[in-house]
Image: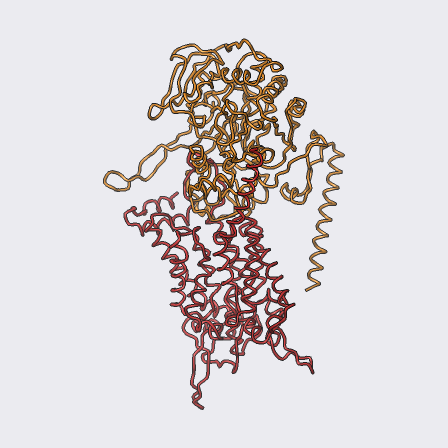
Amino acid sequence: MALIDFWKRIEPSKENQFLHATYDAFFTFMFKPNLTTKGKGVHIRDAMDLKRTMFHVVIALQLCLLVGTFNIGHQHFVALGIHTGFIEAFHLKLVFGLVQLLPIVIVANVVGLGIEFYFAARRGHAVEEGFLVSGMLIPLIMPPDIPLWMLALAVAFAVVIGKEAFGGTGMNVLNVALLARVFIFFAYPTEISGDGPWVAAWTMFEDETTKVLYKGADYYWAHTMFNPLFEAAGWSTFVQGTPFVAGYSGATPLALGAAQGWAQVDAATGEVTGGILSQYSALQMWMGGIPGCIGETSKPAIIFGAIFLLITRVASWRVMLSFVIGTALTGMIFNAWDATVFMNVPWYQHFGMGGLLFAMAFMATDPVTAAQTNRGKIIYGFLIGFFGMVIRVMNPAYAEGWMLAILLMNVFAPLVDHYVLEGNISKRLKRAKEYAK
Amino acid sequence: MTWGIIIAIVLVLFIFTLLTLGEGLLKVTASQAGEDTSDYSVLPTNLQSLLGLGKKKGEYVPDDATVKRFSRGFDVNLAGGPSLGQTGIREVRSATYALKPKDFVGMSPIPKVMPELGATVKAGEPLFYDKAHPEIIYAAPVSGEFIELRRGEKRSINELVILADKEGMQYHKHEDLPNLETASRADLVDFLTASGAWPFLRQRPFDVVADPSMTPKSIFISTFDTAPWASDANLSVAGKEAAFRKGLEALAMLSGTKVHLGVNALATETPSDAFLTAGEVEGVEVHYFKGQHPAGNVGVHIHHIDPVLPNGQVVWHTDVHAVLLIGQLLLEGIFDTSRVIAVGGAELPGEEGYYARVHQGIHIAALLEGMADDMTTEKAYVRNAEGQKEEKMVEVRSIRIVSGDLLSGKQVERESFLSFYDDQVSVVKEGNYYELFGWLVPQTGHPTRSRTFPGGFFPDTHYVPDTNTNGEKRAFVMTGEYESVLPMNIYPQHVMRAILAKDFEKMEGLGLLELGEEDIAICEYVCTSKQPLQAILREGLDELRAQ
């Protein structure tokens, strides 16, 4: 009880709204409040609440986060041409990944939560925990080398325009995390395209003898402070100025696929000369040793998270299943059509490429923005799969479609629900007329 | 990759064979020891029903009867439920009894009271009536002296208190009992409204007292209650089968088409013969239902057999106690409101509930003898006149008493009385305490349906409840939860939204007229956002009724 007494004693008065809102947020984070049911309605409530729901989504994301963090380091060293085995130099890659990731997570959460606290104080209600999930999702869908000021702007846009303008948690029409991503996509397209953002921490060095500029790894204090530790343990260390492999493209499988398709086979020798298969194997794309956004690369981690969400009944299986079916069917249609090189990527290989599984497990299943009737969810998931594949395969500019497809269906989800409800209403009214006679 | 899949399939098959073999061997051993193994299984009950195993229906269900199975619903299993125990059904009497006009939806705040204060009334003599419907008489449940009229705000009448006769019961003897073979429907209606039995008939939509000028398209009775700590109608009807049958005959005459009796298809104890053979009465149909709460709610039965539609037609419903009362009235001419109620709660002496035979309107304190005091004092920080925080001892409630079940009942004081339509009393500990990281920890001992707790995978666990909301009120976020516990073709969340948006056409079109508070109570229980659904529903129903 001493802890509660301490908290109760330091409670600020309600006059300073911002302070009180902050206090309230931290207090309810630590303690489940002592609110009891009012005399009307149910007298007992289920132990489940929204905080717990959000927390379980965050748990489901942790494996993606971990593997994605490691992958940031791995891609960096692949670009340098050293430590190219996936688990080689485990310590270096993990440290590199964390140094890259933590500022992103911190900035996203601080900016987002700060804005939420401000709005909660202004509106006089408790800080709602919707941002716990968005704060974890936003870093996972960003490229590793995103400039932090860009990230802060994107998060501010997403929270203010996408959520608070509509009334806060539970009222938003569009998926908040995707809004942040789409802001960067449309406002700073060149910064996130090409090979730059997928490989982090480099600058141009000048070779002392030949005076030629070359691209080399640039580490700062956050990396080099670990070097004494690694040396003492006899492990490899961060070496400043390690040159990047010349001509390293760092292209994601999607970019390759859009340009060259699945596999360009030399007719004479049967060797794979171009396409995705020339750089990555299907297993590699599945396991996650490829460049891409932080959370979307390792498919087993995502599937683990998805199964976790399904078992705990936090996410809707209807959305996930219809999404998969929609994607598969559209993929098969494209395989049959076979008009461009991208279309000949086998439909089942699409699941291992890009942000498809991540979008399925964590973005499409957001309960607030998805369709809210069970039948509606099936239509919603299916159409996301369909539109996402169409945008991915037929988009000449940017070979990824899920954020746009999901945002499109977010806008149409109320319409889908409307027709499902209209069906229910008209059936009832028709019956009423029949039986009235 | 393919090898992995093959190994996985083989493993699953192996485990399945192991489980089935083990279960079979256990069953053999158990039946050799003389145990009943018909509903025995290694798997927990929810997995059983998922895989289609487990008992399909009770042996008492005739083979040609169709059993309506509800896959949606959730039984709230709580510790401290009523049991017959050593003493069986207790006979409980209290010094005072009362009727509460506020139990009736739509009753005017100041009904016309008929006897003078201090007058002696017999059981069944008129007590009050609503000026809007003067033909419906509300009669005294027991005999005694009409001692007090307790008033609430704006002179509205809260309770009409009767000091009961210490020995015996004086019944008002009704002469000229209508003979059901020869009397007309209008005669029967006149008799029932004048005798005080009419308020037991309620009408859907709105759950108001039935309108005697209307003919309902059907009448529904549910013989089983799936709410937590509910009473058992079999105990009430034991020994009174003739009265039950007479009551059914009367209702069959009142109904426009039929009387539908809902019976539990998978009860642990065989339902009374009075229920199973009710189909022998002309105009009565017996329906078998199986499922978790709210499968016993009459609203669910109405929805699946003869739904309330927005075309002005009404459905009447009542309970077993009322049928017994009407039957006894027509057979013997006396107004006997005795019934077997359940008193449940872990706060009761012995941490267990009991069954009691009481008269309607019994004083609550008489049922809770030996229970700890419901108010305690504790330390709290309050702001004094200068705005400074100081420590004070304040009185807080520690035990809550509810007339009805914990999902849809109303909170009452110890000095209050059992509500008209309730046949159970529940007591529950107040949950006004803080829990460190209460929303985070894996297991907290609170009842839950969610699979984020390990308890969610074992729904047969009985928990001791308390009134903590387990979270703060939020906007509607999770979708599909209400639909998954309501076995009706209705979208509850959208009905709620239509009510909040005051969209009358949508409310009606989506089926608001079919719902009662007791039906939406389970949705409110599972609500993650802690929304006050029953209050919203009542608001919506009142607005539609005013139209």
- The quarter in which the C terminus of chain A is drawn is top right
Tell me where residue B318 appears, x and y as whole percent. Answer: 55, 25
Decide if residue A188 is on the left or right side of residue B237: left
Quadrant of image for the N terminus of chain A: top left
Give residue B299's position: percent from left, percent from top.
55, 33
Decide if residue B155 is on the left or right side of residue A331. left
Eyeballing the image, is B107 above or below A174?
A: above
Q: Which colour scheme is used?
A: by chain
Q: Which residue lies furthest to the front in this view?
A: A437
Residue B395's quadrant in the figure? top left
Say which quarter of the image contains residue A173.
bottom left
Residue B501 screen position, x and y as percent: 42, 43
Whether residue A118 is visible to the viewer of this picture, yes or no, is yes
Instruction: Give the total number of marks visible in the rendering.
Output: 0
Tell me, yes or no, if residue B87 can be seen here. Answer: no
As drawn, B115 above or below A170: above
Q: Looking at the image, which is closer to me, B303 or A155?
A: B303
The residue lying at 60 percent from left, 36 percent from top is B304
Q: Which chain has been coloured orange in this picture?
A: B
Q: Colour of chain A?
A: red
Q: Pick the residue in front: A3 or A338.
A: A338
Q: Where is residue B122 drawn, in percent x and y?
A: 47, 11
**With respect to residue B282, does A43 lie above or below?**
below
Find the residue positioned furthest to the bottom: A210
